Amino acid sequence: MRIAYRGTRYHGFQRQPNAVTVQGELEKQLSRVLNGITTVYGCSRTDTGVHANEFVLHFYTEREIRCKNLVRAMNGYLPEDISVLSAEDTDPEFHARFECRGKEYLYRIHCHESKNPFLSDLAYHYRRRLDLDKIRAAAQAVVGTHDFHSFCAQAMPETDCVRTIYGTEIRCSGADVRIYIRGNGFLYNMVRIFVGTLLDINEGVFPADAMPEILAAKNRLAAGRTAMAHGLYLNRVFYTDAVMTESDSPNHEI
Amino acid sequence: MRIAYRGTRYHGFQRQPNAVTVQGELEKQLSRVLNGITTVYGCSRTDTGVHANEFVLHFYTEREIRCKNLVRAMNGYLPEDISVLSAEDTDPEFHARFECRGKEYLYRIHCHESKNPFLSDLAYHYRRRLDLDKIRAAAQAVVGTHDFHSFCAQAMPETDCVRTIYGTEIRCSGADVRIYIRGNGFLYNMVRIFVGTLLDINEGVFPADAMPEILAAKNRLAAGRTAMAHGLYLNRVFYTDAVMTESDSPNHEI
């Protein structure tokens, strides 16, 4: 099942005993539609306030229901901030998390002196000028296979932090700035620390060419601040290698 | 002063004794910043739930304050859903409403089986297919100077309903459909009835070429339904004739 959600009201994706989560809400409505308790397995966890333009999950059911009707019924029951985009029958071996080959995250910035009244929980409001050439070059430096220890919150020294970044891209249209990053896997807070470090580089906290040294330090303290959660979107989830180099975004991205 | 606002929480622009309105909120904060009760004069009224990507207003003050500081102070006090985009000193004769030469409205439709979790109060969710050629042709028929009696809610027979529409435009990118209409003035509910009639034409309630007859009837009952308020935006306000034919949208439009 492919879904999209606005993360503002949720304590992240993962079910928790005393908090409203996307998984909790989905399982509640899915259990209603399928007439039996149903557990969903998501492709990822997202933090409180983080959004998803595309999120994939799987579940098992004995109930026979056509995918089209399942989508319709779920959208009828789910709140306004969670939407089921599509559903399909799959191999019983399929696992949304273990078979995921890569992901693309998007970080949205409203770069303007005045706030955008339509984006308060949907983009980070940044009042300074952004030097796009500078941050594009800095972003480029993380492409490839690196140890991302410096970009991980709460990593033990022995944690395996080696990940491959396939590409980064920064698009700008007026005040609307979008930072894309695609890779085979992401550590806890990795994208938010990456974006925070870009903003620190923009502001001269670090020199323009600091990224390789920050990576080499393998120490969270070497990198910059953690950018706020509400600008972050899980944008796309890949189950084949082929599409990972494309940078087109799905239609539901606003 | 140029502002933008998300209309969801407000009972329209105009001040009302027992309701939260954009004007009420603005005057409250402006009176704080300028240290004295200040009345604002808006370019237009907007209905409950209607948004503005651009809205112009004027006011008088004896207080000396630099425009840049005024913008900053106001944005500090105003809630997240109202933003001051810019301010400038003007001729004391200037009147935001009387000198307005034209306006552009935008109606946003999310045209998809599944809802968009980021647009619940910002676009009308339309589940049917839209025949763009058909509604583009129908929209084109209102361009020019016509009596828009059929497109006005609560007009008396003697009300002057003659208005000039400079252009209409329908843009589509995936599920995101945007209907633009520019004219020298708009009647009560005119854009919403115009859009509702386009949707009725799309659905075959009226034939594809019905628009001229609907106009000729000069009767509200001849036109279609009133499209919901939350898809509507006052998009641009014009104080010179020259720019009215341009169809570029300002940067703050999302």
Image: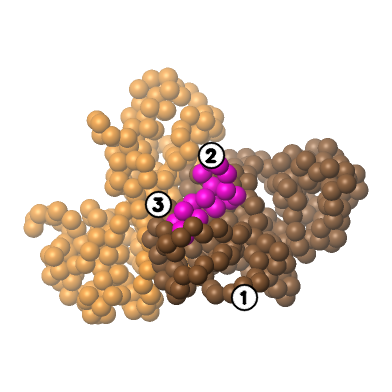
Chain colours: A brown, B orange
Percent across and percent down for residue B210 are 22, 77
Residue B212 found in image quarter: bottom left
Residue B67 visible in this rendered orientation of the protein? no
Q: Residue furthest top?
A: B35
Amino acid marked by disc 1: Asp
Residue at mark 2: chain:
A
Mark 3 or mark 2, whichever is nearer to me: 2
Relative to A33, is A221 above or below? Answer: above
Q: Nearer the viewer, residue A112 or A125?
A: A125
Q: Residues within 10 Å of mark 2 (few under 14, many from 20)?
A: few
Query: For mark 2, what is the residue?
Result: A18
Query: For mark 3, what is the residue?
Result: B121
The mark that comes first in sequence, 1 or 2, is 2
The residue sitting at 48% across, 48% down in the picture is: A118
Query: For mark 1, what is the residue?
Result: A91
Q: Nearer the viewer, residue A59 or A14?
A: A59
